[in-house]
């Protein structure tokens, strides 16, 4: 058992599972054990869709988890100005490094989907997410042939230390980056995305667990290799491919 499976098991045993939407804790546990990255790629190909739900399945607002209000000063300044000065930057292995304001992202074609968020800690939430398909954003930056991964850099310091701390980051491969349900969300349940859930912009990558869905994203770097183990939690023992 790796640490993630231990965590899943202990979340269930110790807290009786903080399950917000029924019946998912076990699924998460089973799928985390049974489906490897290769298996899901082989079985589902690049295009299998995560289940989508209806409005009546939404039972509560999206449960905030992890960092819910970044203390970082650059973030606080942007939030104070309602993110008018926010820019999303696309960097790395692209022909056309480019940045977008929040309004530019909102003006692009959007996608809305009602999906279930499964956290490794044993709770789930169904919510309606609205955002711009990541594929449209990446196309404007024109990925180079050698690009294999999208790395998401976040504003929040997830772990403080004397040397300044560690910022949250995550990564996915370009198959997931170009998946039709992979969006950069700026809205949830018909409201502007709250700070608690990652304002102004957070990733939704619906075939994977919650920790993959980077909140407070300011930069997406295309790379040909993963930095570290590919994410903050991966650097602490979680699987990089968190298939559901
Ligand atoms: N930047 C950032 N992204 C993050 C986290 C975080 O702490 N910081 N936590 C992750 C985890 S473990 C989960 S379950 C979800 C929680 O998203 P929510 O607050 O919208 O429910 O965000 C993920 N993305
Ligand atoms: Mo999570």
Image (cartoon, rainbow, N blue to C red):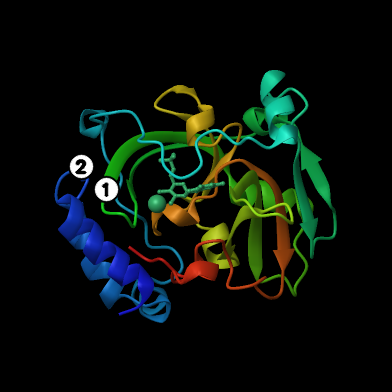
The vertical placement of 61 against 217, above or below, is: above
Q: Residue at x 44, y 69 (%)?
A: 238
Query: Is residue 240 at least partly visible in the picture?
Result: no
Q: CA distance from mark 2 to mark 1?
A: 7 Å
Numbered tag placed on residue 54 in the rendering: none
| Quadrant the C terminus occupies | bottom left
x, y percentage for residue 142? Answer: 77, 57
Instruction: Name the residue nearer the viewer: 146 or 154.
Output: 154
**With 15 as the anchor, is 165 left or right in this view?**
right
Residue 181 coordinates in the image, percent (x, y): 46, 50
Q: Quadrant of the N terminus?
A: bottom left
Q: Are marks 2 and 1 in contact (CB under 8 Å)?
A: yes
Q: Residues within 10 Å of mark 1 (few under 14, many from 20)?
A: many
Helix, strand or loop at mark 1: loop
The answer as to whether callout 2 falls within 8 Å of ligand 1 is: no
Q: In this view of the protein, which residue sits in the foreground, 112 or 194?
A: 194
Of label 2 and label 1, which has the lower sequence position?
Answer: 2
Circle 2 SS class? loop
Please give the residue where the numbered disc 1 appears in the rendered image.
123
Front of the two marks 2 and 1: 1
Could you tell me residue 2's position as x and y percent?
35, 77
Disc 2 target residue: 21
């Amino acid at each position: 058992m790796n640490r993630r499976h231990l965590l899943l098991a202990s979340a269930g045993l110790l807290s009786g599972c903080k399950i917000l939407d029924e019946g998912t804790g076990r699924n998460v546990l089973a799928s985390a054990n049974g489906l490897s990255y290769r298996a899901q790629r082989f079985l589902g190909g690049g295009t299998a869709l995560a289940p989508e739900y209806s409005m009546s399945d939404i039972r509560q607002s999206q449960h905030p988890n992890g960092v819910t209000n970044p203390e970082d000063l650059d973030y606080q300044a942007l939030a104070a100005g309602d993110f008018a000065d926010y820019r999303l930057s696309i960097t790395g292995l692209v022909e056309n490094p480019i940045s977008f304001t929040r309004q530019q992202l909102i003006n692009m074609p959007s996608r809305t989907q009602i999906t279930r968020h499964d956290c490794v800690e044993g709770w789930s939430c169904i919510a309606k997410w609205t955002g711009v398909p990541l594929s449209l954003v990446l196309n404007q930056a024109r990925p180079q042939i050698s690009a294999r991964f999208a790395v998401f850099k976040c504003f929040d310091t997830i772990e403080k230390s004397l040397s300044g701390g560690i910022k949250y980051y995550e990564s996915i491969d370009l198959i997931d980056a170009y998946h039709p349900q992979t969006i950069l969300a700026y809205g949830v349940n018909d409201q502007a995305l709250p700070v608690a859930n990652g304002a102004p912009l957070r990733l939704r990558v619906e075939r994977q667990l919650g920790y993959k869905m980077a909140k407070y994203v300011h930069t997406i770097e295309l790379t040909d290799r993963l930095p570290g183990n590919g994410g903050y939690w991966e650097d602490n023992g979680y699987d990089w491919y968190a298939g559901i």
